[in-house]
């Protein structure tokens, strides 16, 4: 299966968009070689603003640029993009509904070597709670490209969460991405797994494994975490024996909360797979960390078997 690095895809797509729309400006918090905004800096130095290690100032600066008609992209590690600049995002961008795109890079546990201070396990809960904020979590490089283009067309604040590592391509090349929609990646009759980010590929791997046990699993990519087409989620869940949610995020305030709220009262049992109420930690590599936190195809398969 082909893999792509979503950071690289994001950087390249941003350059493409910069050539198409002169309103696009990019702000960076001293991490351009990691977030890959360095590509935009090389192509359009007059529209690139290096703000140093100062996410709060960067966010307020972006708000000002948006008031002049610019489409401002702010960039930092997700833990800082969502956490360090929360007040500026809430007060200066979301209340007035300004056209600023907040890109949280190296999200979840994907910055495996830097430990809890750099791993964002609560950023989606923070951003979902802010009124007027759109929250997106791509499952692969293909969807990252489509999302980056979609948020330029979308007026208003957006938070886009990007993984640090290569991810297998799953999103169909010929499928348009629409904010608010979820996408069926694999059909099944017994249990549906609602997943996003890296956990979509883990869910597909689990579903293939369970085929050999006679268990049919549907996989749905809920990459638009806010807004969500609730009727579509209910349709995906209809007739299922059980539901699994799978996310690289705290079980508090993320995908599990979204799905259980939408399906309240249906009586369909739900098993969540995600990060318990704890911080991240350092590891030798990303897969080791995912295994330590139970974010694996084995854990998803176990949750499906429990429901069956």
Image (tube, helix red, strand yellow):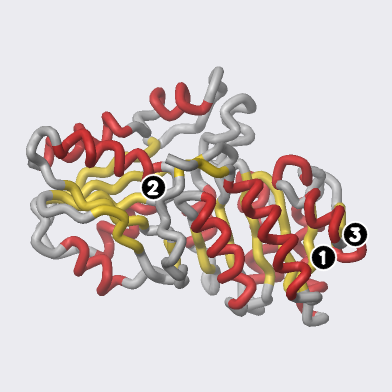
User: Does residue 120 sit above or below 15 in this rendering?
Assistant: above
Rendered view: 132 above or below 255: below
Residue placed farthest to the top in the image? 284
Q: Residues within 10 Å of mark 3 (few under 14, many from 20)?
A: few
**Residue 281's spot in the image, x, y percent?**
53, 25
Q: Answer with left or right where residue 94 lies relative to residue 242.
A: right
> Which of the 4 image quarters holds residue 282?
top right
- Labelled pair 1, 2 in contact (Cβ < 8 Å): no
Rendered-image quadrant of the C terminus? top left
Residue sitting at x 16%, y 53%: 188
Q: Picture quarter containing residue 258?
A: bottom left
**Nearer the camera: disc 3 or disc 1:** 3
| Closest to the observer, 11 or 245 | 11
Q: Find numbered disc 3 in the image and state the secondary structure of the residue it sits on.
A: helix
Q: Are marks 2 and 3 in contact (CB under 8 Å)?
A: no
Circle 1 — which element? Answer: helix
Secondary structure category for the residue under label 2: loop
Residue 226: % across, % down: 44, 66
**Could you tell me how far apart the alpha carbons at marks 2 and 3 are, in whole angstroms?**
40 Å
Residue placed under numbered mark 2 in the picture: 252
Which badge, 2 or 3, comes first in the chain's sequence? 3
The residue carrying mark 3 is 45
The residue that disc 1 covers is 61
């Amino acid at each position: 299966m082909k893999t792509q690095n979503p950071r690289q895809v994001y950087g390249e797509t941003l350059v493409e968009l910069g050539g198409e729309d002169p309103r696009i400006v990019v702000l960076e918090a001293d991490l351009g070689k990691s977030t890959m905004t360095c590509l935009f800096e090389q192509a359009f130095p007059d529209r690139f603003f290096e703000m140093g290690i100062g996410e709060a100032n960067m966010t307020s600066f972006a708000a000002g640029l948006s008031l002049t008609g610019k489409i401002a992209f702010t960039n930092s590690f997700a833990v800082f993009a969502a956490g360090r600049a929360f007040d500026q995002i809430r007060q200066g961008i979301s209340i007035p509904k300004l056209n600023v795109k907040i890109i949280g890079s190296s999200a979840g546990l994907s910055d495996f070597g830097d430990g809890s201070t750099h791993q964002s396990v609560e950023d989606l809960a923070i951003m979902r709670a802010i009124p007027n904020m759109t929250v997106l979590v791509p499952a692969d490089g293909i969807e990252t490209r489509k999302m980056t283009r979609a948020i330029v067309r979308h007026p208003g604040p957006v938070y886009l969460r990007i993984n640090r590592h290569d991810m297998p391509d799953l999103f169909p090349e010929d499928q348009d991405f629409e904010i608010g929609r979820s996408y069926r990646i694999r059909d099944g009759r017994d249990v549906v797994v609602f997943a996003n980010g890296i956990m979509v590929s883990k869910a597909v791997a689990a579903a293939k494994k369970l085929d050999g046990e006679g268990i049919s699993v549907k996989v749905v990519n809920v990459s638009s975490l806010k807004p969500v087409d609730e009727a579509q989620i209910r349709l995906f869940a209809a007739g299922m024996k059980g539901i699994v949610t799978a996310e690289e995020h705290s079980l508090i305030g993320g995908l599990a909360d979204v799905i259980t709220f939408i399906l309240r009262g249906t009586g369909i049992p739900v098993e969540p797979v995600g990060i318990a109420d704890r911080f991240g930690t350092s590891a030798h590599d990303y897969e080791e960390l995912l295994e330590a936190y139970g974010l694996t195809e084995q854990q998803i398969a176990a949750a499906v078997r429990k429901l069956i």
